[in-house]
Image: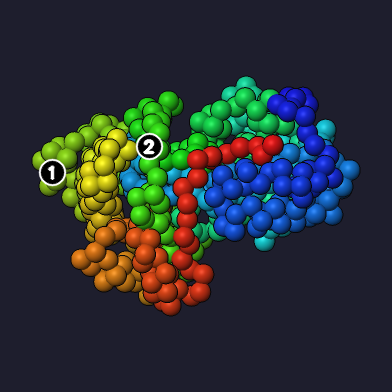
Amino acid sequence: MTSIKIFDKPLATLSSLVAAIDAGELDATFEALGSAGGAPAQRERAKKLCETFASMYGADREVGLFTVAGRSELSGNHTDHNHGCVIAASISLDVLAVASPRADGIIRLWSEGFGEDTVEIAAYHEPDPAKFGTSASLIAGVCKGFENNGFSVGGFDACTVSTVFKGSGLSSSAAFEDMIGTILSHLYNKGEVDEVSFSKISQYAENQFFGKPCGLMDQVACAVGGIVAIDFADPTAPVIEALPFDMTAAGYHLCIVNTGGNHADLTDDYAAVPAEMKAVAAHFGKSVLREVTAEQVISAMPALRETVGDRAILRALHFLSENGRVAAQKAALQAAIAATDIETRDTAVDKYFEGVLASGRSSFCYLQNVYTTKNITEQGLSLALCLCDSFFAGGKGAFRVHGGGFAGTIQAYVPTERVEAFTALMDGAFGEGATYDLRIRPVGAARIA
């Protein structure tokens, strides 16, 4: 283990950080991040976090202030793990952390609502199935990933608070993993570990130490910032393309509805999706579906029905059509960006929305990730999508299942003038505060200085 005190910028004393927050020196950054309540609310949030850190780990510390965004998958539902394409965006919900180095190779991290984890880096350097599913396993996995890639690691104390609620489909686990990577990058590697590198490390931690076979989209989208198209044909070197389109300026709000379901105990449901897709690919001697065509699947259907079953075929066909939709939606956003008049822009946006609706239908019918068969009486996502069908009938906008599915959230693009009515409808069904009116923020993972 390498533990060298290397900082990209001098750390501030905790008291000077609080003074800077009070003086409004971070207000411009807080506003740019687009978080709810703007700079005043974020000042109070950051100050409270500093007070918590002081009470837990001491006021006489040098600290850094860090942020990592949640993410919203905009296109490409369950495609990344089979080397597909996605469009995703960082959003105005985030994990905020105050962190300070320590010299003994121990990480102590307190998260609001979840308590404290303590990890001795040197003693926890291999996956432990007994600790699968714990935040401590993610911390250890990121540290091991940094070491595997030749980066420095070291101990630290940190306090975090998050608006990326667990089980939301907004990637709370990826944001948490990326936060560990962001802190290690800035405290021990001069801030020079780029976002894609520690995103890959975060995926490694979730796959190997946490026990969840996720793809790479969540970690990249949380870390990079803005709207991005990502092609995972070579997952070791994903092709990332910025799509700087302002959906709010076009007259739509990106709303996420939390239906109240939770992603806990659904690891088997998530794992079955890539496993079944890869089983279809294996029939053709391939490792992932990106290397297979729809024509091949259809021509081999009798044999596939015998060997992998109907659901695996449906999920494979979803992947293959969804990958094509991502390309069409990327082209639509590019056309909207390039448009020189409102009519052309709006036509391109409508084309993009056609893909959103088609993706949602495919996810429900063929991918089958809208509810879990473990509990068929709980179908909050189905109810939310049903309400959207009526709300958007004949009007502008679009909607779909959001993220991994099976529980959690839906996504909707709501015309600005109808956001209040949409919120009232969804909050009436799923409880006050169920609807989140979000912004796409330009920054993913960063140290706030």
Q: Which residue is mark 2?
A: 243
Outermost residue on the bottom side: it is 428
**Above or below, comparing residue 274 to residue 405 in the picture:** above
* Quarter where residue 244 is shown: top left
Residue drawn at x 36%, y 66% is 418
Residue drawn at x 27%, y 46% is 342
Tag 1, which secondary structure? helix
Which quadrant of the rendered structure holds the N terminus? top right
Q: Which mark is residue 298?
A: 1
Label 1 sits on what residue type?
A: Ile
Label 2 sits on what residue type?
A: Leu
Q: Is residue 306 rendered to the left or right of residue 363?
A: left
Q: Position of residue 242 (x, y in %)?
A: 40, 33
Q: Would residue 368 be seen by someone viewing this image from the given angle?
A: no
**Above or below, comparing residue 396 to residue 333 in the picture:** below
* Quarter where residue 82 is shown: top left
Please rate how many residues cluster around mark 1, counting C-alpha atoms within 10 Å: few if below 14, some from 14 to 19, many from 20: few
Query: Mark 1, mark 2: which one is toward the viewer?
Result: 2
Q: Is residue 86 rendered to the left or right of residue 325?
A: right
**Above or below, comparing residue 97 to residue 115 in the picture:** above
